[in-house]
Amino acid sequence: MNTLKGKIVLVTGGSDGYGKAIARAFVKEGAIVTIAARNEEKLKVAKDEIKCDSIFSMDVTNYDDWVKIREHIEKNYGRIDFLINNAGGGVAIIDTIEQKREDIDKAIQLNLNSVIYGSKIFGEMMKNQKDGTIINMSSVCAKQAWQGWTVYAAAKWGVLGFSKGLYVELQPHNVRVTCVIPAAASTGFQKNAGLDNVNVMLSVDDIAETVIYVCKLPQRAVVEELTVWGIDQIVNPL
């Protein structure tokens, strides 16, 4: 498998949850990692903890912030090897007819628009390099149906479909695109979405190891999509 030592990595939503675990795993592999999120104080704490190279405060739903972080990456590193589009959130996990318009818009912007923005900005950079890997984080909600998850699921279905199309576009330029589809893990997702915490065996480190595995594959190998369940989770789809 390929070494990740010295590779340039950007992880969005990197101040906690999956993002921080993924960034930590890259750092352990010797990669040069930038983590991005909205809360600068949380980013500083995460940087001290995982010893990543740099932080960048941004709103992933703001296209101009993506332009700024590309400038940051180009100025400081000259290239990018791995973009991990991880930032996202549940916003409001309630039935569709009870959703507020602003929460619907926020959920789509946070979970789907941000992925498209980042992939456009850094996909162009990777195309010019003739090299790079984009990993878009989706959710098992993209493949299953549960009450209250419709809007979030719509965004995550979008991430999966977008990732497939993006790979078709970037494949001729030696750029890989993978969609990682995690089940529920022990993150702050439930609390941020207004849900009761659910005890599950799947950990953020399990998802981080999955991302590292995909990134360490030889350039000739591409994982189109990869779903990760916890062994204790029972799937009762529609």
Image: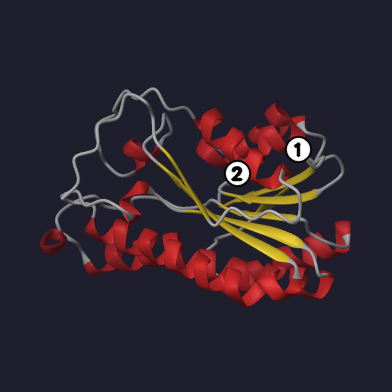
Q: Nearer the viewer, residue 54 or 181?
A: 181
Q: Which residue of the protein is positioned furthest toward the left in this rendering?
A: 97
Residue 152's disc number? none
**Residue drawn at (31%, 51%), measured in percent from left and top?**
141
Residue 15, horizontal then vertical, whole percent: 58, 40
The quadrant in which the N terminus is found is top right
- Residue type for callout 1: Cys
Q: Is 174 positioned to the left or the right of 63 in the image?
A: right
**Residue drawn at (18%, 51%), measured in percent from left and top?**
148
**Residue drawn at (53%, 70%), measured in percent from left and top?**
116
Above/below status of 14 relative to 166: above
Above/below status of 195 relative to 107: above
Q: Which residue is mark 2?
A: 14
- Residue type for callout 2: Gly
| Quarter-of-image position of residue 102 | bottom left
Badge 1: how crowded within 10 Å, few (<14), some, or many (20+)?
A: many
Q: Is residue 87 visible?
A: yes
Q: Which residue is mark 1?
A: 52
Above/below status of 2 relative to 24: below
Badge 2: how crowded within 10 Å, few (<14), some, or many (20+)?
A: many
Q: Is residue 61 visible?
A: no
Q: Is 77 positioned to the left or the right of 59 in the image?
A: right
Residue 51, horizontal then vertical, whole percent: 76, 32
Discs 2, 1 touching: Cβ within 8 Å: yes
